[in-house]
């Protein structure tokens, strides 16, 4: 059995917010065509046919919708997409769906659709009102915390499985305990914390929201203290980075490509059908082709993919001497200062600081998991 994963951008880089740190807005600005537009029915149909051609009986197809803001494609698009799935995908394969959203367009109808079709929803929510409203703003510069809270209430009321995704900025990293407590007060939701990215063309640490390694290390240590106290009390809070470390220590496969130390686990499908190897590199230089012109097998064996994988698999030279490489595995290339041996993971000091501090307790929890 194999898993085919597609990260689909049905509304390309379109978004109704103006989050000041948005990495995909930055990526879109760095390519010739900023927005590939809303995905048409013909492109969606071709994608599903290509997935059907590549899948064998017993395989799993994972379709994740991201953006920009994917809900801007409209609920009708998603309803039609799932109807086409029933017609085009063989019953011998399993299909899982997820979506990452800012929640601004969600209504009870959206929530009912997600629940009925068992769509896992990731809701972007930055740690608390103060942090969220500082950077996750609408075109008028107004904070969107209250609207995100309304979306979460709709999802919870409908029984939708929901994860909370939090972007860690320099300001937020000062208050790990406050962030942890704020998010846990919202209910029992798995949490994912991702370090804020500086723009591609900007020097590291040059933005008002930039996250410095030492500050990120402080955040991870404080976050872990909160997590560990809850774990000792019999209350497990799923935090994706900690989950991955625990899985690795317990001899299991991690859930993310960054923790696995291997790129190329999915295909990005842009609004026009354009194919790319990674969400962080939807750039002209990494464009593989178009789903209208090639199948999945041809795409994943293309020269562009092979070049991307070769560069992504060459870990920074500093990884070879690192005692934590078996856990960290070099991290995501988007965090590297350069490709290949000459680079290093910008957040390497943060991960070293965290693992120096937390590893014995991680091993203790992993022993229970094992």
Image (cartoon, rainbow, N blue to C red):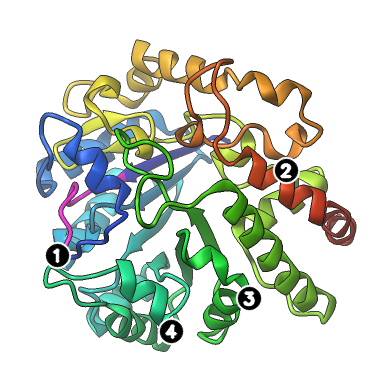
Q: Is residue 145 above or below residue 293?
A: below
Of marks 4 and 2, which one's residue comes earlier in the chain?
4
Q: Residue at x 50, y 54 (%)?
A: 194
Of marks 1 and 2, which one's residue comes earlier in the chain?
1
**Is residue 208 magenta-colored?**
no
Q: Which residue is mark 1?
A: 76
Q: Which residues are magenta?
A: 8-16
Q: Which residue is mark 4?
A: 156
> Are discs 4 and 2 less than 8 Å apart at CB?
no
Q: Is residue 26 above or below residue 191?
A: above
Q: Residues within 10 Å of mark 2 (few under 14, many from 20)?
A: some
Of marks 3 and 4, which one's residue comes earlier in the chain?
4
Main SS type for the magenta part?
Answer: loop
Q: Residues within 10 Å of mark 1 (few under 14, many from 20)?
A: few
Q: Which residue is mark 3?
A: 177
Tag 1's secondary structure?
Answer: helix
> Are discs 3 and 1 less than 8 Å apart at CB?
no
Q: Residue at x 90, y 56 (%)?
A: 367
The answer to whether any part of residue 328 appears in the image is: yes
Task: Choose top left, top right, bottom left or bottom right for residue 204.
Answer: top left
Q: Is 276 left, or right, of 46 in this rendering?
A: right
User: Which numbered circle lies on residue 352?
Assistant: 2
């Amino acid at each position: 059995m194999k898993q085919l994963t597609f990260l689909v951008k049905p509304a390309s880089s379109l978004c109704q917010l103006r989050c000041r740190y948005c990495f995909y807005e930055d990526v879109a600005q760095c390519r010739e065509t900023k927005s590939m537009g809303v995905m048409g029915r013909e492109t969606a149909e071709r994608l599903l046919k290509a997935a059907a051609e590549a899948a064998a009986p017993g395989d799993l197809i994972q379709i994740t919708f991201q953006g920009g803001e994917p809900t801007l494609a409209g609920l009708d698009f998603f309803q039609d997409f799932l109807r086409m799935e029933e017609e085009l995908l063989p019953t011998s394969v399993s299909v899982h769906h997820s979506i990452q959203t800012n929640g601004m367009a969600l209504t009870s109808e959206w929530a009912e659709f997600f629940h009925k079709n068992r769509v896992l929803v990731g809701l972007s929510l930055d740690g608390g009102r103060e942090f969220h409203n500082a950077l996750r703003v609408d075109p008028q510069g107004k904070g969107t915390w209250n609207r995100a809270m309304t979306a979460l209430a709709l999802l919870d009321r409908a029984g939708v499985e929901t994860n909370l995704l939090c972007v860690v900025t320099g300001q937020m990293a000062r208050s790990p305990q406050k962030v942890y407590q704020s998010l846990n007060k919202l209910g029992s939701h798995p949490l994912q914390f991702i370090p804020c990215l500086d723009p591609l063309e900007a020097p590291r640490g040059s933005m008002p929201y930039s996250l410095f390694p030492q500050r990120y290390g402080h955040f991870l240590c404080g976050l872990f203290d909160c997590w560990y106290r809850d774990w000792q009390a019999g209350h497990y809070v799923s935090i994706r980075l900690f989950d991955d470390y625990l899985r690795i220590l317990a001899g299991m496969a991690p859930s993310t490509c960054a923790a696995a130390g291997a790129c190329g686990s999915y295909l990005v499908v842009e609004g026009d059908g354009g194919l790319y190897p990674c969400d962080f590199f939807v750039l002209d230089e990494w464009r593989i082709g178009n789903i209208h012109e090639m199948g999945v097998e041809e795409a994943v064996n293309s020269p562009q993919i092979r070049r991307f994988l070769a560069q992504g698999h060459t870990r920074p030279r500093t990884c070879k001497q690192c005692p934590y490489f078996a856990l960290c595995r070099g991290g995501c290339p988007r965090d590297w200062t350069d490709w290949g041996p000459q680079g290093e993971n910008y957040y390497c000091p943060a991960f070293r600081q965290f693992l120096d501090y937390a590893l014995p307790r991680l091993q203790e929890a992993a022993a229970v998991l094992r």
